[in-house]
């Protein structure tokens, strides 16, 4: 399964079976997380067989999540810029997990932060967690804004830009808010933008990763660049 297929397949899953993440799957996931940590400076940690964070807390009562026993905790330096990186690299791990046959759900609110079993230094914060495991189901596709609503551009839309937007449509966002926009400033120059709001910077990082894959950013014959 390539990354485009993984993006199509991925939906948030909130109910999990008892099947453990183990063996080669576990090792491959851990090593990928390690690579992403080295590249980003984030401290993503895979926590296995730990049920407390999703069992207690005010949200547990609503029963939104069932049988979450594993999660990835994302710890980052206390600095506003790390939120976009959290989204970008967290989604890289999410899509890798999808390729490995696992299901996931980004979780900002509906878990108990105090029960998360990770080390956090004084200059760090727990940004968010990602529930992970073998799902009871595959989730379902979210409703999406049209690509025109997710873009700013003048004239004709280049093919690569359209492919990037289509991939970004598939990105998970908090409460499915999709408040990101890709602005084609001039020929081959794109700025990713978002408005102020809850988790919008994390959402932006996630959408940027999707856009890069759709618009083939890593290709040698790159047709465009980011404007920061
Ligand atoms: C930053 C972020 C935070 C999220 N927080 C929660 C959460 O606290 N509880 C929850 O049930 N879902 C949460 N989600 C999942 C979104 O509701 C979900 O991604 C969105 O509805 C789109 O659906 P999809 O992921 O199936 O495509 C979050 C997603 C993101 C990206």
Image (cartoon, rainbow, N blue to C red):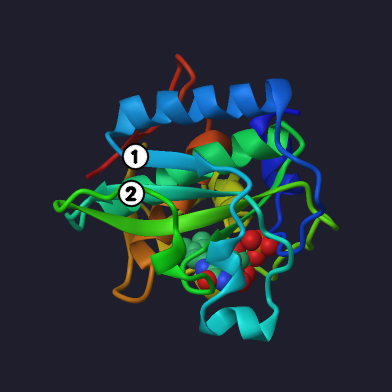
Query: To which quarter of the image does residue 142 belong?
Result: bottom right
Q: Are marks 1 and 2 in contact (CB under 8 Å)?
A: yes
Q: x%, y% of residue 36?
A: 41, 30
Residue 149 in view in this figure: no
Query: To which quarter of the image does residue 94 belong?
Result: top right
Q: x%, y% of residue 192?
A: 35, 53
The quadrant the N terminus occupies is top right
Q: Which mark is residue 75?
A: 2
Residue, disc 1: 43
Count neighbours of disc 2 (C-alpha within 10 A) and say few if under 14, some if 14 to 19, many if 20 or more. Answer: many
Q: Marks 1 and 2, how far apart in space?
A: 5 Å
Task: Determine the secondary structure under disc 2.
Answer: strand
Front in this rendered view, residue 29 or 36: 29
> Is residue 87 positioned above or below 222 on the image?
below
The quadrant the C terminus occupies is top left
- Is 50 placed left or right of 138 in the picture? left
Q: Is mark 1 within 8 Å of ligand 1?
A: no
Count neighbours of disc 1 (C-alpha within 10 A) and say few if under 14, some if 14 to 19, many if 20 or more. Answer: many
């Amino acid at each position: 399964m390539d990354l485009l297929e993984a993006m199509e397949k991925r939906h948030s899953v909130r109910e999990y079976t008892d099947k453990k993440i183990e063996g080669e799957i576990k090792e491959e996931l851990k090593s990928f997380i390690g690579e992403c940590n080295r590249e980003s400076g984030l401290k993503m940690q895979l926590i296995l067989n730990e049920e407390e964070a999703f069992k207690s807390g005010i949200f547990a009562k609503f029963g939104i999540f069932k049988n979450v026993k594993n999660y990835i905790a994302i710890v980052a330096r206390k600095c506003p810029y790390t939120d976009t990186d959290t989204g970008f690299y967290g989604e890289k791990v999410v899509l890798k997990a999808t390729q490995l046959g696992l299901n996931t759900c980004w979780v900002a609110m509906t878990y108990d932060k105090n029960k998360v079993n990770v080390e956090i230094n004084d200059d760090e914060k727990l940004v968010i967690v990602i529930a992970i495991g073998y799902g009871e189901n595959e989730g379902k596709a979210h409703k999406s804004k049209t690509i025109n609503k997710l873009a700013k551009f003048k004239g004709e839309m280049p093919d690569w830009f359209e492919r990037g937007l289509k991939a970004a449509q598939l990105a998970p966002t908090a409460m499915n808010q999709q408040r990101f926009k890709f602005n084609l400033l001039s020929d081959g120059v794109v700025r990713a933008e978002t408005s102020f709001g809850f988790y919008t910077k994390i959402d932006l990082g996630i959408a940027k990763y999707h856009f890069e894959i759709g618009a083939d950013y890593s290709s040698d014959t790159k047709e465009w660049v980011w404007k920061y």
